[in-house]
Every structure is written in C-alpha cells, then in structure tokens.
Amino acid sequence: MKFTTMLNLIVKTLNKSSDTQIDVCVTSKMASQIELWTALFENRPWWVDNKKVFGMNLPSSISSEFSRLVTLELESEVVGSPRADYLNEQYKSVLNDLRRNVQLACAKGGMVFKPYVTQKGISVQYVQADCFFPISFDGSGHMTQCVFAEQVRRGKNIYTRLEMHEMKGEHLHITNKAFVSTNDYSLGVPAPLEAVDRWSKLSPGAVYEGVDRLPFGYLRIPSVNAEDTDSPLGTSVYAQAVDSIRVADKRYSQVDWEYDAKEAAVHIADSLLKYDKTRDAYEYPGGKERLYRSVEYNSGAKDKPLLDTYSPDIRDESYYRGLDKQLKLIEFQCNLAYGTISDPQNVDKTAEEIKASKQRSYTAVSEIQKATQTALEDLVRAMDFYATIYNLAPICTYEMSFRWDDSIVVDKEKELLSMQQDAVSGMIRKELYIAKKYGVTEEEAVKMMPAQPKNFPDDE
C-alpha cells in the first residue's frame, strides 16, 4: 500500500477513536516526497521508462557513499557494568547492520531503530521512513506519538496491525489494533490479534510509568527540506538534486542511444540475400542479422551500390563531458566532494575549490554522524528500558563510547608521511609517529620501538 494512502487511512482510523481531531505532523506534501525518494532509490522515478530514458541509479549510489563515509571505521560500545555487558551483546548486531540501515535512512530521510524482546533477548526492528507514521513531536524534537503499520496477506484477506506509541506526561501508552480488509483502499473492520499467528502473543495495550521518551531511536537525516520547511522529519540526502538527477538520467540515455544509433552496419540489396519461404524472411550471411540491413534498391542510372557500409563517427566525448558536468552539479547539491560520482580525472577546479568541496562533504557527514549517534543512544536507552521491564539483566548504570572517522578531509597517508619525515629529522619524538600510525598510546609506542644500542664504555 502506498505511504500516502496508508497515512490517510491511519489518520481516519485514529480520528474515529479520538475525541479531538489529530493533527498529523506528516503533511501530504511530505508524504509525497517520501514516496518520490523511495522511487528514486529503487531506480523507478516517473521519468524512467527503460525505452527512451534509463536510470543511472544515482540515488542509490549517493546514499551508499554517504553511509560508507558516515560509518567508516566507527567504533562504539556499551561499557561500565553487568547491565552494560548485556546491552553491548545486543548492540553488536546493530553495529554490524548499521551501514546498510544508514544508507536506507539517507535515501528516505530517516529510520526508526525499534527494539523488541524475544526468547533469545532483545532484537531490533529497522523501520524505514515509508513504513512508520509520526504523529507529533515535542519542543526538543523528540517524537511523542507514532504509529507503526504492518500488513499480512492471507488469501484474499489483508490483515493490518497498527501499533501506536504515545507519551502522556511520564506515562508511555502502547496499543495494538488489528483490522482485516479485502482491498488496498481501506483498513477494513476490526479483527482480533490472534487472527495472525505472530501477533497472537501481543498485548492489546500496556501503560508504563517513569518514561521520558518513546522506546526507540529515530535517525533523522539533518538536511533542509525545501519542499516542506516546517516538517520535523528528516530529508533525503539527494532531495535537493531530484531534477538534476532527472537531467543526468536523460544525458546518460543520450550517450547510450548514441552508441546504438552509430552502430556499424552494412546495407545490402535484397537481391543478394536468399529468401527462406518457411520462415518468410531473408537469410543473412552467417546469421549476422544485427550487422546486415536489407534494403530494396530501385533500378536506374543513379542506383546506390548493392553493398553500402554505414559507420559514422560517435560523438561520445562531447556527450560524456555534458554528463560529467551534470554529475558535478549533483555532487554540489548533495554536499559530496567533487569526483565522488563524477570522473575524478576531470575535476577542473582549483586546490581551494577542491578543499572546500571536501570540507562541505565533511560537514554533511559529521552532521549525519551526530544524528546517528543520537539515534543509537536512544536505541540503547530503549533496550535498557525493556531489559528492566523483563528483568533481562541486573539494574546498573552504563556508558556509551563512540569514535568516528575523520579521513574525509585529512589525507592520512600524507599526514603520516609528514610525521615520519619530522620524526626522522628529529623535529618530533619517534614514539609520537608510531602512536599515530598504529593507534596506540605513547607508552605502548615506546614498547614497540626497537631497543636502543648501549654505548661502549670509554677506554681507560
């Protein structure tokens, strides 16, 4: 079911059971944007027909590159107590899948990391932006009401489960409602949770005290949404480049057509070909139907030759230059460094412009890293909440640590080479260079250094 359709059905259902009209923070314009970003990520925007216009799958590449830069060499753990050890074991699986999930969040504007308890411990459900429905936020930017939708098809019946999380003061309300329908245009009528096996053990409702936020982490991509500036939701990393991506797909398709249109061929008279009556077609030499094109020449003094070669020049260089310029525009609009998706050999920029583009990319990545860290901290807080409710580990405090990579701007190889030269020349201590290169402390670096030869005693 389309995101906008589900959103309207959820609002209609909530308003039926509410005394006051619910003011949903997801506008129809924002819902349409999320659908567009999703279509772009799946390489099926409205302009791609795979006949005249083909997609380059740029949105997937852009979001993939951002997720790589964001999660590159990330180190994080939960420490400080037996509770921390338990949470850290559950947390490791989150880090293992983080790059993929950050890519999906970058593409669609956000993602919810929603923990839940199983017989094996705490698992995490990764809910993409087109599968959860924020209702309201508080002044600090925390979500205070949200609905998660899940659908299961059983023959002609479509079962929908709505799971609402709502903060009321310091009380957390979680409710589950099921519906059954025979079409995609309505939720249908109420149904018991037991109608679907995997929902049978869910509680219709629960209230928890002493809670200050919803029990999940929300990764909000911190880009400005020019289409809906008041929206508290995240924005796709390629939101500002949608039209430029459309033009790039068109340029790419023109290059592809140029090669097809200028493919070498031999025009041959029908009289030179053997006619196969059984197939009602001419037989081409050696089965070279792709190379030979039959032509019916008229008789006369100005006849063309019976064989005519078609092999025009291909204008690929000029087309590729135009495509590359379009890719550089997309890089600028998406805050990527020049040469990320364009040809790095054709970066016709000054050293200052290249440095500025790397700095721009570094700033964008750093902001997403901060948003990711906030989401992970909220996720572990929610995991701690469930660990307490279900008595999964002793109640203790815990701490989280994060180390993010900063190699987008800093060229580590050049930096290490410069430090090595300074160490050799005696400008800095050698253990500083070893500590930097291998990521150890100065004390450990000294132990790694070879033993210094002892001087011979002076002759008496």
Image (spheres, grey):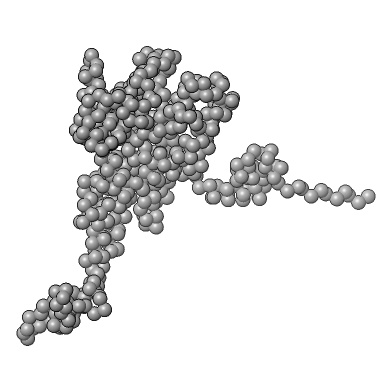
In the rendered image, which quarter is residue 31 located in? Answer: top left
The percent coordinates of residue 273 (x first, y second) are 17, 81
Instruction: Tell how many labels.
Output: 0
Residue 376 in view, yes or no: no
Q: In this view, does 104 lie above or below 324?
A: above
Give left or right: position of 233 versus 46: right
Residue 289 in view, yes or no: yes
Residue at x 18% of width, y 74% of height: 293
The percent coordinates of residue 45 (x first, y second) are 24, 46
Residue at x 6% of width, y 84% of height: 300
The percent coordinates of residue 270 (x first, y second) are 14, 79
Residue at x 43% of width, y 28% of height: 116
* Front one among 120 and 6: 120
Query: Which residue is situated farthest in the bottom direction here?
Result: 301
The percent coordinates of residue 400 (x first, y second) are 53, 29
Residue at x 34% of width, y 35% of height: 128
Query: Which residue is situated farthest in the left direction here?
Result: 300
Give left or right: position of 183 versus 145: left
Q: Quadrant of the N terminus?
A: top left
* Front one among 292 and 340: 292
In the rendered image, which quarter is residue 18 located in? Answer: top left
